[in-house]
Image: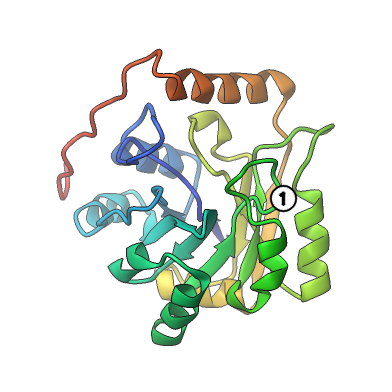
């Protein structure tokens, strides 16, 4: 079983202010025993060609990915070509799925945010391969529960993701996938339900620290970190 996270952000993100580089995220994931990782920047698919050897040296398979805004809602597109950046409507997504065998995941579909899918998840259920169990929850406040019920009703697998914006989120919720350690095999295994969610809630102090740090950065109180240049290896 491979330890996998399909939803993470780094300082390469064009929208969110993230305090660590892509290589630093890979290092932390490797230290926590991850076998595969998708770096899913908002509306830009990171070119992982130079990062992949760096990750492989540390035992981590990189999966191409993007958190794309489609008709105002966030959708994870995994193991597609760079054309995933051009998807703007759910009709575009349907055409992409016909051309390529990537993986489409519904991230945080019922979290109280304008970019969450809510009713569009049901309206476009046939376009989604899996539903995310998001790490941002506590024992007493968990917006994942409607997603769990939806996935059961529609026969879709759940995947555990960190939605990592701070390192405190990494390792609390993840997927165990029965697959070979390559992107296509991992995505196929998830589509066919060979995946299990491993999760534990954040403590309230950790949740407050993570959300507070993100809010401070969003307000621009701290300077945004300049992305480091990517090298093939060190």
Query: The C terminus is located in which quarter?
Result: top left
Residue 112 vs 205, above or below: the answer is below
Image location of residue 163, percent across then percent down: 54, 44
Q: Is residue 88 visible?
A: yes
Image location of residue 206, percent across then percent down: 64, 22
- Indicate left or right for 223 with 157 as reference: left
Image location of residue 197, percent across then percent down: 69, 56
Foreground residue, 105 or 206?
A: 105
- Indicate left or right for 73 with 31 as reference: right
Foreground residue, 32 or 150?
A: 150
Which residue is identified by label 1? 110
Residue 192, quarter of picture: bottom right
Query: The N terminus is located in which quarter?
Result: bottom right
Residue 141 vs 185, above or below: the answer is above
Residue 139, quarter of picture: top right
Foreground residue, 55 or 205?
A: 205
Q: Residue at x 45, y 25 (%)?
A: 218
Q: Residue at x 38, y 71 (%)?
A: 80
- Indicate left or right for 230 with 8 as reference: left
Element class at badge 1? loop
Q: Residue at x 63, y 67 (%)?
A: 130
Residue 218 vs 181, above or below: the answer is above
Q: Is residue 193 visible?
A: no
Q: How is the image coloured?
A: rainbow
Q: Residue at x 73, y 22 (%)?
A: 204
Question: Dot 1, how many residues are within 10 Å of its Cα: few (below 14), some (14-19), or many (20+)?
Answer: many
- Indicate left or right for 223 with 29 as reference: left
Q: How many marks?
A: 1
Image location of residue 214, percent across then percent down: 50, 25
Foreground residue, 46 or 30?
A: 46
């Amino acid at each position: 079983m491979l330890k996998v996270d399909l939803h993470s952000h780094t300082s390469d993100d064009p929208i969110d202010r993230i305090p660590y580089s892509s290589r630093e995220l890979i290092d932390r994931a490797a230290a926590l025993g991850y076998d595969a990782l998708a770096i899913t920047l908002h509306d830009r698919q990171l070119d992982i060609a130079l990062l992949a050897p760096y990750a492989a040296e540390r035992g981590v398979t990189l999966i191409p990915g993007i958190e794309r805004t489609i008709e105002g809602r966030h959708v994870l597109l995994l193991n597609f070509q760079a054309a995933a950046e051009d998807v703007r409507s759910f009709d575009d997504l349907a055409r992409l799925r016909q051309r390529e065998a990537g993986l489409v995941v519904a991230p945080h579909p019922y979290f109280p945010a304008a970019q969450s899918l809510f009713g569009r998840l049901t309206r476009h259920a046939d376009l989604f391969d899996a539903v995310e169990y998001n790490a941002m929850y506590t024992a007493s406040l968990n917006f994942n529960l409607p997603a769990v019920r939806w996935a059961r009703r529609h026969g879709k697998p759940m995947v555990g993701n960190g939605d990592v914006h701070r390192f405190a989120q990494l390792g609390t919720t993840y997927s165990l996938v029965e697959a070979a350690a390559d992107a296509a095999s991992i995505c196929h295994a998830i589509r066919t339900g060979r995946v299990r969610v491993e999760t534990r809630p954040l403590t309230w102090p950790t949740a407050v620290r993570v959300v507070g740090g993100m809010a401070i950065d969003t307000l621009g109180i701290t300077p945004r970190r300049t992305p480091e240049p990517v090298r093939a290896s060190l």
